[in-house]
Structure formats: structure tokens, C-alpha cells
Image (tube, coloured by chain):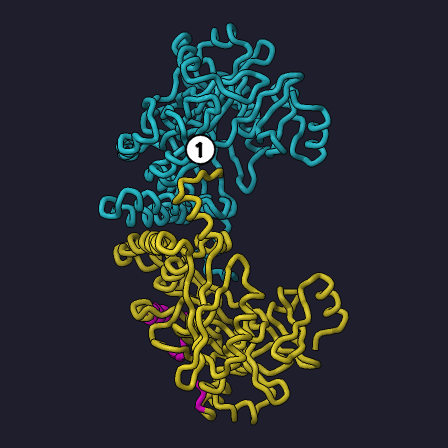
Chain colours: A yellow, B cyan
Amino acid sequence: MIEVSLVREAVKQRKARSESFLGFEYLRFSDDFREIPRGTAVFQETVIWGYPHIGRIFMLERGLREQFEKPFWVEEKIDGYNVRIFTVGDRIIALSRGGYICPFTTDRVQDFIDVRFFEENPDLVLCVEVAGPENPYIEESPPFVTEDVGFFVFDVMRKDRRDFLGHREKLSLLEKYALPGVEVFGRFTPEDTEQIKRLLLQLDREQREGVVFKEDSERGRRAKYITSYANLNDIRITARNMLQLPPEYYTNRILRIVLFMEEEGVERTEHLYGELGKAFIEGLFSAIEQYRKEHRVYRTFRCRFRSRENALALMELLHRTSKHIQVVERELKKEGDYWILSFDKIFLNMTGLLGHLLGGGLVFD
Amino acid sequence: MIEVSLVREAVKQRKARSESFLGFEYLRFSDDFREIPRGTAVFQETVIWGYPHIGRIFMLERGLREQFEKPFWVEEKIDGYNVRIFTVGDRIIALSRGGYICPFTTDRVQDFIDVRFFEENPDLVLCVEVAGPENPYIEESPPFVTEDVGFFVFDVMRKDRRDFLGHREKLSLLEKYALPGVEVFGRFTPEDTEQIKRLLLQLDREQREGVVFKEDSERGRRAKYITSYANLNDIRITARNMLQLPPEYYTNRILRIVLFMEEEGVERTEHLYGELGKAFIEGLFSAIEQYRKEHRVYRTFRCRFRSRENALALMELLHRTSKHIQVVERELKKEGDYWILSFDKIFLNMTGLLGHLLGGGLVFD
């Protein structure tokens, strides 16, 4: 429960607002507010807590020793988007990290999750990473999802509670209902650094994003660590949208790469010099090339729906929530069992700036 | 003249404030305010206008054709700091771009500028770039100043006026008083792109910053263009202070490098991939190395003064105006005819972040 006076204060400060979407009415926390994380949602009397922030370590060896007192599980961190899936009445819905009902994820739940799980556990919430080349939100995609999307359960919560089920309880539920989970690499201690480093070098080679460490203890402390591949990939992919990112986006990633090189030894990581430059430059070249050909900088997304209404609802959500990005539908057509939606996200700031610069315009800075 | 009501409004909005320094009382515009540029200063009835912003072109060929209708002079842009030097009563003082009286520049004027210029032209203002390894403000330094600093006159203004003397009038004054000027590469038209490109490739090889184009016309339109060397050098040098820079600092420079490659052809500029990565990574490595050795990230400055009082005044000014940077005096000692001041600028944010990260701390983003 969240106290009524707290809700009232959050609404007054515009940190929470009521939402009406897909036939649901609920309260959504659009920002962190006191102890309540962004994305927390209240349906009638039921609170679905926002997924908490997980801190990142930049130095593997020192960070693990500093952060963990007990053994911890190491799980794969998958490059997708984070949703919480649960029942409201007799319907199953998926909330995005920010607390919006996602029409795409909601549409596709039953393709990946056995609904018996929710029938038999109406009080549970699945925390799932949805990832793959045909998702409507992010350009990154893990190498092991080559079409459509995959669902990867990484945590289970209870309604009205902020904490997670323990690791073994989670695994037994995944097994019982044959739910797809993220890969678990094992249980380690802070002394196992060499083994964990080898694991991360392997993930890096396989173009995977990184890992989450979850302490096997009451306090359940967590931390994450990202591969250089993923840091570089973020830089490469976001070049088109460079002007819209928060100032620390690039400096953080560059620092992570440099601290990785520092920890691994420069001799073994020298290739990263060229790769960092390439990540920035090639991303921008492709934006320039696109602008020259089509006079706009954009990215096309495509995704599959069971129901046409959900595809339309996704477009409505994207129109409503996109800032500095123009979302334009290309096509919505039936192919076999699916409705295939394709649409463009046009990056307005980069489009405007490149138009100005390539036309010989002046910039005052 | 600036109208009294405008001054009053600027003060009210905290865009202008009165300053008292080195025995002078004046009004300083700390920000652009309506038509008045930042750095404008009012001494009694005399207005010293702020040096105007000069726009930058990112594409040389297209930019020159777009911006200039008539022939233009091409002058060297020197990597230093911009001051305006003039008389108040019987004293000669130098104002920084932001409108502070600079005790260092003021101290050294007579080493570089024949004071007869001011005696015979009390209504004129010299716009000067001060550059070299022993300046108190910036780490960059042009290759042709190997010790101390140099003064390079690039414009002449009149008191109470915003415009500049014409090119020929300026040159004849420089000649008459044997004043040091920036190098003038000639008078070109927008059709001379190939020649200008060759000039810029040469400046790039010589590790020089770039050029300013000044139209030889009534409107006197101006624009600047920076070499890749200077763009990369900025990235390399500012790594220690990365967290303090405005968000567009790096994205702008990366865009400039990419548009340079695009204009020159990638085959001929491929080396920039590695150099861009190196610029970021080496700068950060040196910050990390410094932190490990000395537990702080800093840069030592050293400069020469004629008078001890001016050295102390500079320290006072730096203490008063530095944000997120701690300025610590190392030494002030007499050597021959000069007082040698050395001091450190400690970059507090980077020091704090590296301490946190290298100690294995978590970052939430």
C-alpha cells in the first residue's frame, strides 16, 4: 500500500498521474518520488512496484569485493526492454519500466509465457526482458534472438511488495511452468574474479551485453557490469539520436571502456582505440548518408502482433510519449497469423542539425 | 552608450553586475542580454563592447558559398584566450572574454605591445589572442609559441562602438606600431575552395587551430573553421575535466571531425578513426594514472609576471570565479626579471568520480 496522502502529494508535484489505456484506469509514477521508484503503478488497491535501479560497477575485481559480502548468482543481462507482467482481473498485461501498459508486450505474452502461471499465481509479477530485432523500442538486439523477439524472465515479485522471490524459488517456478529465463552462469564469490573475468570476455566476444550479480542473502544486494562490446554498440547505434541523449551518456560509456582497458591491460585491449573511434564515426556517417538520400534521419522498426487493435494502440502510445521524435506509420498488414506493423522514428533534432550543417549553415557555440 | 533603463533591467535580471578589481569600478555583463553580448563592460561613461560570437561552418565548400557574397580575408585562428586591451585614464588594462580584468594579461601588455599605440590612440581597443604554454587559463597552446605566451592582435575596435576597423586600417596600425598580428593568409573568394582546403590541411599538419574568414565588405560577415587536429586536441586535453563540460562539447567536435572526413573523402582521412578513440582514451588514462599516484586529478599551470601584486590578484580572481575546480597555489618566486607563479587546478568532479569508481563503487544511471 502507498498512503493516500503520499499519492496526493506526488500528483500535486506531477510525479504521478492517472492513466487510462486499453480499458484500464490506474495511477502511474512518472518519476522517482521519495521511496517510490518511477514506473510504480496502482490498479485499484494493488500496487505494482517499479523495477528498482541496479547500480553498475566499472571495475570488476574491486567492485565485486566492495559490493558483495556473500556469494552471489551471476545472470545474463540481456539487451532489451524491461517489463513487469501480471494479471488485472482476468487479463494479463505488461507494464514498461516507466509504467505504461505496453500494447506490444501485452499482445505477445501468450506466445512466450504459459498462462497457467498467472492462473495459478495471480499474486505474482514476472519481471521480463523482451529483446530481439522486432521490438518497437530499442535498436539493440542480442545475438541469440535472430527474428521476432524473445521473453526472458529474470525476477519474480509479488503484487504489493517491492522485494523479489529468492533465486531457488524463482528457478523452481520457471521450471514448473517451463518459462524462458535468462541464462544463469552460476554462483560465485568475490574471490572468483578470474573466472568471472573470463566469462565476461567470452560474453564480449559473443556480442552479449553483460551480467547482473545478485547476492544470495537476505539483503539481496545487486550490481551489473557491461561488456565493452555493449558499450561500443550503444555509442554506434545512438549516433542518429546523439543530440537527444543526456550529457553523461557518452562520457559514462567511454569511462567504462577505459576502466575495462585499465583492468585488463592495454596490450590486450589496444583494438579498442580504433573501435571507439569507429563507433562514433560510422554511426554518424550512416546518419549523414541517410540524410543525403532521404532528407531525414530515422530508423525503421517492425514488429508482429496477434491483434490489429494492439498495433494501433502501440502507435497511439508512441505518438503520445515520443519527444523530439516523429513516429510515422509505414504499413500494417496481415501475414499468416500476425499483423506486421512497421513504422519510422524520425530523429528531428539530428535531421534539423544535419540539414543546417550540410547546407553550409553557421553554428554559434 | 547603453541606456540606463536597460542597464537597470540587466542588473535586476542578474545579467550584469558591478565589479571592483585592481582599483577599477565597472559594470560587467555576465551573460548575453538582449543585444548586449556577454563580457561587455562599462567604465564610467565608456562602453567596451563584448567581443561578438563568431559562427562556425562545419562544411568548408558549402559553408563558404552559403555565408559569403564577396571576397573575404582568411586569418589564422589561434588557440589561446581572447582579451580586449584599452586604456582607462592613464592605465592600460585587459578584459577577458567574460569581462573580467585579467591581472596576468594586464601585467604583460607592455612586453608585447608598444604603449605608444595607446598613447596616440586612446579611443581604440585591441582585440588580442594570448596564447602559449605559460598562460593561466587554457591547456592548449599553438606550436609556434614554445615558451611564455605571445600576443596576437586580430581586430581593432573603438570604444563605445561594436564594429571593427576595416582590414587595411587594422594592418596599417599594426605596421605603424609594430604590433604582433595573427597571420593573414590572403584574400579569397568562395570559389577558391581548393586553395583554402589545401591551406587548412597544411595548418592541420602543423597542429594549428584553424582560420577565421572575414568578408571584405560593409557588413563584414565572419565565420570560423577548425582543423581536425584542434578538434581532437580539445577532446584529448579536456578528458580530465570531462564531467564539467556542456553536453554538446563532444558531440559537436565529433560531428565536425566526421563532416571533415565526409568532405575530404574517407580514404584520405581513415587515420581519424584511431585518433578519435585515442584522444578520448589517452586523456582518461592519464587522468586515472594521476589519480592513482596522487589521489587527485589536476593540471599545473605556470606563468610569468612583472609584478608580484598582479600574480596575487590572478589567484584571487581564479579563486573567485572557478566552479567545481579547486585552485591551489604551488609557488610564487622571483626568477630574473619575472615573478613565476605556479598553481594547480584540481578537477573536483573527476577526482570524486574516479575515486568512487576505482574503489569499486556503484553508479546508478
Question: Is A218 located above or below residue B171 in the figure?
Answer: below
Residue at the location (43% across, 13% down)? B169
Instruction: Work out whether residue B107 can be spotted.
Output: no
Question: Is B13 located above or below residue A228 in the figure?
Answer: above
Residue B162 sits in which quadrant?
A: top right
**Label 1 secondary element:** loop
At which x and y percent is residue B278?
Answer: 32, 48
How many numbered marks have been drawn onto this rendered protein structure?
1
Question: Is A20 located above or below residue B275 in the figure?
Answer: below
Residue bearing the label numbered 1 = B138
Residue at the location (62% across, 85% down)? A88
Q: Nearer the viewer, residue B176 or B350?
A: B176
Q: Which residues are magenta?
A: A178-200
Question: Is B235 located above or below residue A4 in the figure?
Answer: above
Task: Report if residue A181 lies within the magenta region.
Answer: yes
How many neighbours does mark 1 have within 10 angstroms: few (below 14), some (14-19), or many (20 or more)? Answer: some
Residue A206 sits in which quadrant?
A: bottom left
Q: Chain of mark 1?
A: B
At which x and y percent is residue A13?
Answer: 71, 61
Name the residue type under label 1.
Ile
Q: Nearer the viewer, residue A355 or B277?
A: A355
Residue at the location (40% across, 67% down)? A140
Residue at the location (40% across, 55% down)? A239
Task: Report if residue B88 lies within the magenta region.
Answer: no
At which x and y percent is residue A229?
Answer: 34, 63
